[in-house]
Image: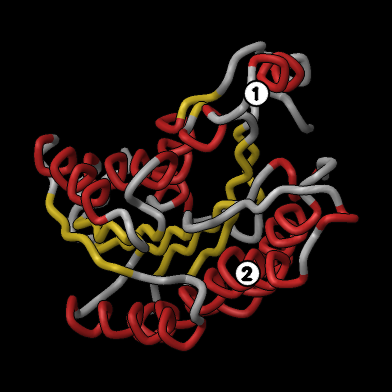
Amino acid sequence: MFDLTGKFALVTGGSRGIGAATAIALARQGAYVVVGYVRGEDAAVKTLDQIVAAGGKGEILQIDAAHFDKTESTVAELAKRLGQLDILVVSAGIAIDGLMMRLKEEDLQKTLAVNLGGAIASAKGALKYMMKKRFGRVIFLSSVVGESGNGGQTAYAASKAGLLGVTKSLAKEYASRSITVNAVSPGYIATDMTSALNDAQREAMLKEVPLARPGLAEEVGATIAFLASDEAAYITGQTIRVNGGMHM
């Protein structure tokens, strides 16, 4: 099951955290994986090394999701060079937290540009090639915050909630070409981002999780690998929650 042999995948934000776990998961199922990164080239190389160590193949690619046209053209040029692009996983994202009264317009615009604009641009660059092949898997990384909200994360929540609308719209737009579009909504996952939380914050979050533990990046990656597979061909326009019951 979940055999991705012969498939080519791009994972934006693939150098660390959920993105890295996803890149490795896809490679283990046989996909050729392009690890997208912004500045952390060393981290991207480390992810690629893990892919190779697991018997997979891939490469790294710098993509700055903050710039719409450049992101679109970078993805399109990659697909053209590879000759195909079957799977797109958009994991690149940023969080600039703060209470509404302290929110700066530049922080709002940057968050929306990367998390929402970059996701749309990546999809736009990939879809033209998926359409030609009449096959594709587009998977966006949203967040439990985009569904339930969270104090101090208005900009982040807005960007992640927006991805859910993008998911449903693109799913309807490209279903006739056998292209599925889905979102994965992680909850409290043990990553570099959540490691910055203090003990009180971690304890407060765990109280909201019925399974009473943080999720693993590998658990999110496994869900994405499923959505990228032939076995998930009849799933589109959906938000798959990987959150331990944090939001139902």
**Which amino acid, mark 2?**
Lys
Other residues around mark 1 within 10 Å, as few (<14) / some (14–19) / many (≥20):
many
In the picture as drawn, the residue positioned furthest to the right comes out as 101
Query: Is 22 drawn above or below residue 242 in the view shown?
Result: below
Q: Earlier in the sequence, mark 1 or mark 2?
A: 2
**Which amino acid, mark 1?**
Gly
The N terminus, quarter of image: top left
Disc 1 designates what residue? 244
Q: How many marks?
A: 2
- Tell me the SS state at disc 1: loop
**Quadrant hosting residue 199:** top right
> Residue visible at 51% across and 26% down?
190
Disc 2 designates what residue? 110
Q: In this view of the protein, which residue sits in the foreground, 82 or 204? A: 204
- Tell me the SS state at disc 2: helix
> Residue visible at 41% across and 55% down?
13
